[in-house]
Image: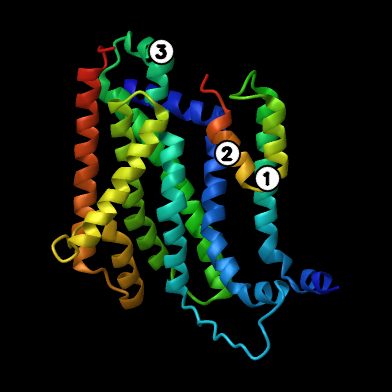
Amino acid sequence: MEVISILSEMDWAVVAPLLVIQAILLIVAIIDLIRVDNTHGPKWMWTLIIVFINIVGPIVYFIFGRRQE
Amino acid sequence: MQWLTLLQKEMTENVRNVKWIWVPLIMILIAIMDPLSNYYLPQIIDAAGGMPEGAEIQLPDYQPSDIVMMSLGQFSSIGVLIIALMTMGTISGERKSGVSELILVKPVSYVNYISSKWTAAVLLTLVSFSLGMVASWYYINLLFGELSFGALMQVLFFYGLWLMLVVSLSIFYNTLCRTPGLVAFLTIATIVLMNLVTTIFSHLLDWSPNKIANYIQQLLISGSVPSELIGAAIVTIVMSAVLLIASVYTFKTKDMAA
């Protein structure tokens, strides 16, 4: 119950940008993962990392997962 | 004109490897994290089970300048880390994979090659940083109180110089060694070391680039630019220029070896 009341109290105009940024990162990372031929390490591992680790997952993929080429 | 072509190549590459998407987003994220979490701290404490019976914490009444400093604090830690990781392979990676040889076999001057790399990295960094600070500024005005646009521009300018120095350091190490991981490590190690030296010899190094953030705080509180800030800005620009010249030189001498 408490969680619900907090959710309704929150000002969504303030919090929405955070969620949008997180969503864009996730989508871009997934599209990129599909597009590239190969990554450092298996692709299924990166899929799990991107989807299940908030915000940090996509960033880690962009920095360490992508092959330069 | 060769320089423009090279710059264009860098920009296209940064669009293709989606750096132009994720770096700005991260910068916005780390800039707005602190304004938001501090504003919602009472609710967050409540949601986490609330304070124990009778305990009372007086939450400080934040001024807009405090929040700007918090955002800058995030940039000086996570932001610098992201910049170092993002630029670590820009030259060293190309040398490892042989792309730089493909480019340099044509009559491309080393100066153009290095400076186009540097410009592309600085542009990406500064645009991302500016977007982040504008987002932070938006929340500050919304949640904490008025902060003038002029003050924001001053913060952007002076802190941008410091980030420019970080990029220059990274480019310099890029020409020095071939392993991207080592480049990132050396960049961050150098910044930590500079920080340490500045703290220890604080009374001697009034113009140290590491003090720019402190001077920005003074600037926000007093409203006028402290003279030390001008000095620190000049030192930062000179250091960046020296690093850039040094990287062209090391690249020239080390390129053919190994």
Q: Amino acid at mark 2?
A: Val
Residue type, label 1: Ile
- The quadrant the N terminus of chain B occupies is top left
Mark pair 2, 1: CA separation? 10 Å
Q: How is the image coloured?
A: rainbow
CA gap, disc 3 to disc 2? 25 Å
Marks 3/1: CA distance? 34 Å
Amino acid type shown at disc 3: Gly
Where is residue B126? Give x, y as percent.
41, 47
- Image quadrant of residue B36? bottom right
Label 3, on which residue? B98
Q: Which residue is mark 1?
A: A53
Dot in front, 3 or 1: 1
Of the residues tagged 3 and 2, which is closer to the observer? 2
Disc 3 with disc 2 on a shared chain: no
Numbered mark located on residue A42 in the image: none
Q: Residue at x 32, y 57 (%)?
A: B158
Instruction: From the viewer's side, name the closer residue of B92 and A52.
Output: A52
Label 1 sits on a secondary structure element that is: loop
For this rendering, which residue is in front, B55 or B93?
Answer: B55
Task: Tell me the subunit letter for badge 3.
Answer: B
The answer to which image quadrant residue A33 occupies is: top right
Q: Which residue is mark 2?
A: A60
In the displayed structure, A26 sits above or below B100; it is below
Dot 2 or dot 1, earlier in sequence: 1
- The x, y position of residue A17, in whole percent, is 66, 57
- In the image, what residue occupies the spot 54% across and 65% down? B34
Residue positioned 53% across, 70% down in the render:
B140
B147 displayed left or right of A39: left
